[in-house]
Amino acid sequence: MSGIEFSTEPVPDSQEIAALYLANGWSSGQKPDLVRKALENSDGLVLARHRGQLIGLVYALSDGHLVVYYPHLIVHPDYQGKGVGKALMERIMQRYGDIHQQVLIADDHAEPFYRKLGFTFADGTKPMWIYDRAADGAG
Amino acid sequence: MSGIEFSTEPVPDSQEIAALYLANGWSSGQKPDLVRKALENSDGLVLARHRGQLIGLVYALSDGHLVVYYPHLIVHPDYQGKGVGKALMERIMQRYGDIHQQVLIADDHAEPFYRKLGFTFADGTKPMWIYDRAADGAG
C-alpha cells in the first residue's frame, strides 16, 4: 500500500493512541496515558502513519543480548490485510536480528502470519498472565 | 529452606551463570557472557544463594507501566521443590505489582506452579519464537 510512512519517533500522543487501540477493541486504549508512558520506556518502537494518521505500531522490550519480547503489534482495522503488520514486524525484527531469542505471544488466528516471518510455536509451552483487574482484560 | 539469601545485586559472574544454567540443561549456559550482559541490562533481577552458591534467579523486562515480561526463572535442580522458585517470583512480582500486565511463558508442567502465584492461561494464545540457530534451542 502506497503512502504509508514508517518511523521510530516521536512517541504518539495519548489521543492518537486511544484512537488506534480503541478501534481494535484493545482495553488498554482506555488508558492511553499508560500506553504512551510504556512506549516512551520501551527499548524499540516502529510506527506506521498514513496521511499523518497513526495506523499501526509495534514495540519491543529487550535485554539487548539474550531476549527481545514484542508486547504489542497493532494495526488499525481499516488498514489490516495490506502488509502493514508485516512491514512493522520486519522493521523491528531487523533491529533485533542479532538477539539470541525473539519471542511474542500470538492469538491462534495470527499464527500463520508470524510463521511467515520465521516464528515457530514451541509445543508444550503456554503464555500465562496476571492482569490488573481494574483494567479489565487483554491488550 | 533455611540459609537461602535473596538479593538484587551484584550480577553473577559468567562462571556462576554457566554452572546454574548448565545444571538445568539450558543451552544459554553455553553462552554465559551473553546471559551476564542480558542480566546487566535487565529491568529487574532477583538472585538466590545458599552458602554463597548461586542456586536460582529470575529477571524482568518491563516498560515500567503496561507490561512486565519474565524471560527466565531458573532454580538449580538440587534446590527445586523447596520454595526457592516461589520466593524468587514473589519478590520480583512485588516489585512490578502495579504494572498493568505481568506475563511469562510456562512449560506445561509448570502451569500449576504459576497458577498458585495468580497467573492464568489465556485460551486461544500461544508463544512463538525465533532462535539464533547457532545457539541450538530453548533457554
Image: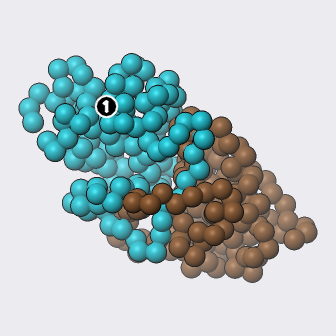
Chain colours: A brown, B cyan
The residue at the point 50 percent across, 43 percent down is: B137
Q: Position of residue B121 (x, y in %)?
A: 36, 68
At label 1, counting other C-alpha atoms closer than 10 Å, the crowd grade (few under 14, some 14-19, many 20 or more) is some
Position of the N terminus of chain B, as image quadrant, is top left
Q: Position of residue B18 (x, y in %)?
A: 39, 25
The residue at the point 32 percent across, 36 percent down is: B24
Give the chain letter at badge 1: B
The residue at the point 69 percent across, 70 percent down is: A75
Please give the residue where the numbered disc 1 appears in the rendered image: B23
| Above or below, comparing residue B36 to residue A90 in the picture | above
| Above or below, comparing residue B7 to residue B129 in the picture | above
**Label 1's element?**
helix
Residue sitting nearer the eye, A79 or B131? B131
Along the horizontal axis of the image, is A24 left or right of B36?
Answer: right
User: Picture quarter containing residue B49?
Assistant: top left
User: Picture quarter containing residue B97?
Assistant: bottom left
Along the horizontal axis of the image, is A91 left or right of B122?
Answer: right
Spot the residue most to the left. B2
| Above or below, comparing residue A133 to residue A39 in the picture | below
Report the amino acid beneath label 1: Ala
Q: Position of residue B100 (x, y in %)?
A: 42, 61
